[in-house]
Amino acid sequence: MTPPAAEGVDIAIVGGGLVGASLACALAPLIERYRLSVAVIEASPVLDQAAAPWQPSFDARASAISLGTSLRFTDMGVWPAMAEEAAAIRHIHVSERGHFGATRLDAEELGFEALGHVVPNAWLGRVLHRRLTGLPVDWYCPDRVEAIAPTPEGYRLALSTGTSLQAGLTVLADGGRSGLKERLGIISDTRPYDQVALIAGVEMSRPHRGVAWERFTRDGPIALLPMRGQTMELVWTHAAGEERRRLELADGDFLAELQAAFGDRAGRFRRVGSRHAYPLSLVTAREATRPGLAVLGNAAHALHPVAGQGFNLALRGVMDLVASLEEGLVKGRSIGAAEVLEAFDARRAADRHNVTRFSDGLVRLFGIDSRLLGHARAAGLIGLNLAGPLRRDLARRAMGLER
């Protein structure tokens, strides 16, 4: 049987979540300048892109947006709208329960108004999709890629609705949910942490004043991120299985256990919202590119949330891909040319390696229960707090201003 004729597109983005939507927005100048045709294929139904959040990545979580990421969103023209629901991070406080050592980062000391911001994922999604409604981007939604195969011109995608696309460049930004990587033979190295992140909004007894807390405890790291009002997002890491009991606790009992684990530094925990749990693993795809193919976001790398760098790393990948595509177009290269994507991969390699190594090392260092090592960690936190240049370098990296 003869397959249906394929519709030709320059770029097919598989996944309309935070990373895929950000890429489509970032491509706007190239779409206009080079008349590129861009398609986004998303499996989840869209009722109203400008109204209620709908996509699975626009869930109960919030994202820590570094200063560098907010500057990139400013270039896309979407940051002013995102900032409407953003809470500034003006101070970062890192400590270990039971030890005196602490490291403090301060925006004013570094000459900035904020180190970053915390924005609900649902709001990020709404703003990105509002922007996309004004761009000449073709949506295939709800739709999914049922089959994908390389061709001399790029990749051919067969969609569940019967449509076939021939794309010069296909970008996998689906978080790995569809299994397309595996079908293409792209292997991922997966290292389960045997940990689960319990996430919820908590209301505090006093204003948070823009302080983000990272508290390492014997029960696992506890992060508190400032949000609007006196609300903070709680990210509480548990050994796999231990989170189940706390998910089922009455609110008062849950808050009492949280207070006992975290302490009183941030004030009293007064209320808690819906609790959600997410298993944690370090996932790294062995291939980020092939001729006509690029892998972005959680499909390329999934990190532990302890350092808050996952989405910021992904967005830098988005912007580097757009920059590499533009360089290739200026030189007259095809959109999915091997040399264009190899240049992108080379541009990303050091950043991916450094952020992955830092976040994974942090998890493992503070996950070792040792009295002697605990004192050494405390001394390290104190030393880092006293070493101004080193602390400022760490802050600038966390803010996405250096790689």
Image (tube, helix red, strand yellow):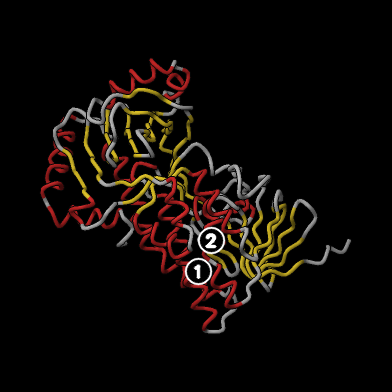
Instruction: Tell me which residue sits at (33%, 18%) in the image.
Output: 256
Placement of 368 over or under 77, stated as above or below: above
User: Crowding near pointer 2: few (<14 within 10 Å), some, many (20+)?
Assistant: many
- Give the residue number, with chain letter if any, for mark 1: 322
Instruction: Tell me which residue sits at (60%, 68%) in the image.
Output: 292
| Identity, as a three-letter code, of the amino acid under mark 1 | Val
Residue 10 in percent (x, y) is at: 65, 70
Instruction: Say if mark 2 contacts mark 1, CB within 8 Å.
Output: yes
Instruction: Tell me which residue sits at (34%, 33%) in the image.
Output: 230
In this rendering, position of residue 67 left or right of residue 9: left
Q: CA distance from mark 2 to mark 1?
A: 8 Å
- Give the residue number, with chain letter if any, for mark 2: 23
SS class of the residue under badge 2?
helix
Residue 93 in percent (x, y) is at: 23, 40
In this rendering, position of residue 159 left or right of residue 16: right
Q: Classify the position of the C terminus by image quarter.
A: bottom left
Residue 199 in percent (x, y) is at: 43, 32
Disc nearer the start of the sequence (2/1): 2
User: Crowding near pointer 1: few (<14 within 10 Å), some, many (20+)?
Assistant: many
